[in-house]
Amino acid sequence: MSLKQMILLIIVLSAVVIIGCRKHSQPRSAPSGSIRMVEKKIGDMGAPSDLKISYEKQLLSLTNECDSFIVWNTDVSDLPPVNLETEVTKLSALLFMENDPEKIFNTIAGYIYDSMKITVEKNENDLDAVFPQKILQSRRGTCLGISLLVMQIGEKLEFPIYGVLVPGHFFVRYSDGVVKRNFEPLRRGESMPEQWYREKWPTRDTSRYSLRNCTKREVIGVVCYVLGNRLFADGKYPEAVAFFDRAQQKFPELIEAQGNMAIAYEKIGQTEKSIKILGDMADRYPLMDGIHSRYASLLLKTGRYAEAESEFRKALDADPGNNQVLYGYAMALYLLKKCRDADAAISRVLFSKPDFEGASDLKSKIEQECR
C-alpha cells in the first residue's frame, strides 16, 4: 500500500456523517411509567417568536423542496393513506378540555401506534418516514418523524409539546412550565427520565445537550440537517452544503451540521474551507466527539504534519484506545521523521488489532526509515 493510499485511508475512516437516531448501547435498566417534574423555568418554554412559525407550513414547504431531489415511494403501505386534518379532528374530540399530559400522550400514542399502525423506521435518510403527511401514507416513522407528527398534532390542538434533542436522537415533551412529561418515539410514547437519555446517548459535551425544549425554528433546523444528510448520502454535496448551512442558521447549537458541511466541502475539493470550519470548531467545541481526529485527518492530507500531530494527540487524550486515531497519529509522526514515537504508536495499533488495515505497511515503512 502506498503512502498516499494510507493517508487517504485515514480520510475515509474519519468522514463519518452523524445521522439522527444512531445506534446506541442497550440500557442497563429501562425505567418506565410517567415522569412528572415540577419546575418553573421560563427557559423551559418555547420562544415567544415561535408563535409566528407553523410546523404545518414549514414542513409542507420543505416537502415540496424535496420533490426536486428525491423520488417519493408511492407504493408504501397496504393501508389506505389518511389526511392529517381529519385525524386531528378525531383526536380533538377525544381530548376535548383535557389537560392531563399522561392522558394526552397516551391518546396520541394509541392513535399513532395502534390506530395508524405506524412502525419505527431505523433508516434516518428515508424521508417518507420523516415528514408527517408522508408518515401517514408509509406508516413508518423515524424518531424525528414520529416526533414531528406528535408536535404537529400538538400545535393544532394547542398543547405545549416541544422537541428535545440529544446527540443522535430526538424525542418530544409536554411542558407547560410546571409539569413535564417525555414521549419516547422508539418506545411507543413511553415516558423516560432524562438520565435514561444521557446514559443511552452519552456525550462529553453536556453544555450543548442540556435536554432543553427546542424552539420551532430549531426543530426546522434539525429537519434541514437531516435533509442535508440525505443529500450527502446521495452524493449531492453542493446541495447538502446549502441545507447544512440552513440548519446552522436556524439552530446555531447544532454544530454537527457545521461539521458535516465541512466534510461536504472536502468532498467537492474545497479543502481549505473544510479546514477553516473544522479548525474553528476544534477551538470552540473541544469536547465534541471526533472533532480533533477529523480536523487532524485533513491537516495530514494537506501536508500540515505538525498541526496534525497536535490534533491527533488531543483526540487521543479523549479516546486513548482508538486505533483509527492512533494510526493517524503514527502516520503524522512518521512524516515528521519522529520514527521512534511513530513505531511506538503503530505498535500499539497492531497489538490491539493485528489486521488493522494499513498498519503493517506503515510499520514496515517506519522500520525502513529508522534503519
Image (cartoon, rainbow, N blue to C red):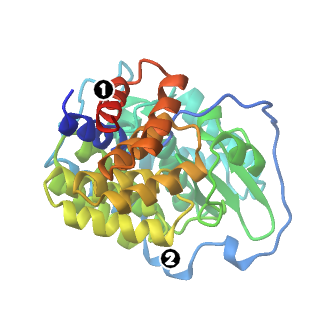
Q: Nearer the viewer, residue 121 or 337?
A: 337
| Residue 37 coordinates in the image, percent (x, y) | 84, 59
Q: CA distance from mark 1 to mark 2?
A: 60 Å
Instruction: Please give the residue where the numbered disc 1 appears in the rendered image.
Output: 361
Q: Amino acid at mark 2?
A: Leu
Q: Nearer the viewer, residue 14 or 157?
A: 14
| Residue 156 coordinates in the image, percent (x, y) | 51, 59
- Give the SS element for disc 1: helix
Identity of the residue drawn at 53% across and 32% down? 348
| Residue 203 coordinates in the image, percent (x, y) | 62, 51
- Give the SS element for disc 2: helix
The image quadrant of residue 44 is bottom right
Q: Nearer the viewer, residue 164 or 239?
A: 239
Identity of the residue drawn at 25% across and 23% down? 75
Q: Seen in the image, is 238 located left or right of residue 212? A: left
Placement of the N terminus among the 4 image quadrants: top left
Instruction: Please give the residue where the numbered disc 2 appears in the rendered image.
Output: 51
Q: Seen in the image, is 200 located left or right of residue 83? A: right
Mark whose residue sits in front, 1 or 2: 1
Q: Is residue 354 above or below residue 288?
A: above
Q: Is residue 146 above or below residue 239?
A: above
Q: Amino acid at mark 1?
A: Asp
Does any portion of residue 64 appear in the rendered image?
A: no
Q: Seen in the image, is 6 located left or right of residue 109? A: left
